[in-house]
């Protein structure tokens, strides 16, 4: 019933999702998926923020799909080692293809968070979807934060002198964390603190943040491509902010690999590897190239091994020591 409802809801957006699936075939290694696997993946049903768990091709096991982070964690959150986020207008097909490349490289299942633009970015989709990536996406997020600040009532935005004095005299009430829980661990009836991007259509970012908060015990690798790198950066910065100076096991354990765009990761995560093709003007134009990164010779922006000048995901992970030599 849920899938049928999703299908009806998404019918007006079929042309845009079909366009995204075509982009997947250009930018991602979709040939790494079997025809049967491709036939079971639906850009119309597998929404932004849903999760696909992709095993290595040699395992013979099926791809599994989850609509929510909670259901994923309940079923197999304790076994997956890697999360991936695709970009450049990808659908579930591109996400699964990237996850397959990573799973084959590390010899273990990889979970992909389905990325996309959602209904709130329909206008951008109609224009082609390219410019929500990189610098334009940063500008959009900053603009949304500015608008929210400008539209906040003055009484909420600026505390009075009396409020300041009372705050000094009494301890501040417990504030809910990103999961909506108080410091005591009890569920909170208050809304969680607002996130800088919190508008309809950010389900992919919310899902990744929820997964990091859950801290799957086997998680040690996070791989992004293109716009997915910016989403990872945003989520990790929020994750650090929500901890408010506290340490966390993921800081040291998590290895982060970005492909096709160089972004500024929080310093709390020391194991960051950023790779970009030396021919990748598209990713370079949306990158912070003054940050440490590695140039991949004779590679452009795409990960499709059937096309020339591709960036090979498996080879990249092996070169930086994240995956074992084959």
Image: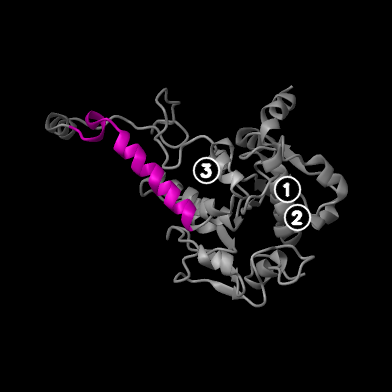
Residue name at image x 60 percent, y 75 percent? 278
Task: Name the spot of residue 64 as percent of width and height, x first.
Answer: 76, 40
For disc 2, the marked residue is 25
Q: Residues within 10 Å of mark 2 (few under 14, many from 20)?
A: some
Can residue 55 be seen here? The reply is yes
Which numbered circle lies on residue 21?
A: 1
Q: Is 60 in the magenta?
A: no
Task: Name the spot of residue 26 as percent of width and height, x first.
Answer: 73, 58
Q: Is residue 138 above or below residue 120?
A: below
For mark 3, give the secondary structure: helix
Front label number (3 vs 1) = 1
- Give the side of residue 222 with respect to residue 235, left or right: right
Quadrant of residue 5 within the rendered picture? top right
Measured Cα–Cα span from mark 3 to mark 1: 25 Å
For mark 1, give the secondary structure: helix
Q: Which residues are magenta?
A: 135-159
Measured Cα–Cα span from mark 3 to mark 2: 28 Å
């Amino acid at each position: 019933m849920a899938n049928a409802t999703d299908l009806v809801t998404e019918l007006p957006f079929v042309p845009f999702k079909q366009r995204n699936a075509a982009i997947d075939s250009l930018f991602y290694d979709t040939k790494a998926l079997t025809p049967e696997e491709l036939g079971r993946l639906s850009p119309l049903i597998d929404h932004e923020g849903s999760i696909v768990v992709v095993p290595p091709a040699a395992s013979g096991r099926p791809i599994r799909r989850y609509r929510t982070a909670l259901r994923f964690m309940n079923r197999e959150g304790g076994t997956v080692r890697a999360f991936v986020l695709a970009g450049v207008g990808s659908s579930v097909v591109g996400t699964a293809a990237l996850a397959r490349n990573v799973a084959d490289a590390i010899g273990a299942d990889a979970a992909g968070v389905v990325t996309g633009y959602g209904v709130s970015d329909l206008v951008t989709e109609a224009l082609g979807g390219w410019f929500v990536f990189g610098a334009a996406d940063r500008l959009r997020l900053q603009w949304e934060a500015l608008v929210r600040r400008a539209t906040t009532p003055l009484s909420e935005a600026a505390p009075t002198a009396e409020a300041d004095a009372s705050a000094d005299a009494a301890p501040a009430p417990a504030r809910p964390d990103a999961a909506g829980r108080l410091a005591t661990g009890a569920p909170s009836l208050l809304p969680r603190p607002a996130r800088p991007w919190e508008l309809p259509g950010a389900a992919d970012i919310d899902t990744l943040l929820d997964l990091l908060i859950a801290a799957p015990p086997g998680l040690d690798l996070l791989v992004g491509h293109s716009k997915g790198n910016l989403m990872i950066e945003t989520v990790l910065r929020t994750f650090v902010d929500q901890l408010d100076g506290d340490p966390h096991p993921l800081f040291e354990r998590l290895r982060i690999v970005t492909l096709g765009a160089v972004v500024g990761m929080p310093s709390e995560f020391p194991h960051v590897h950023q790779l970009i093709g030396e021919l990748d003007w598209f990713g370079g134009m949306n990158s912070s190239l003054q940050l440490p990164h590695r140039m991949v010779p004779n590679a452009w922006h795409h990960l499709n091994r059937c096309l020339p000048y591709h960036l090979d995901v498996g080879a990249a992970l092996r070169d930086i020591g994240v995956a074992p030599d084959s």
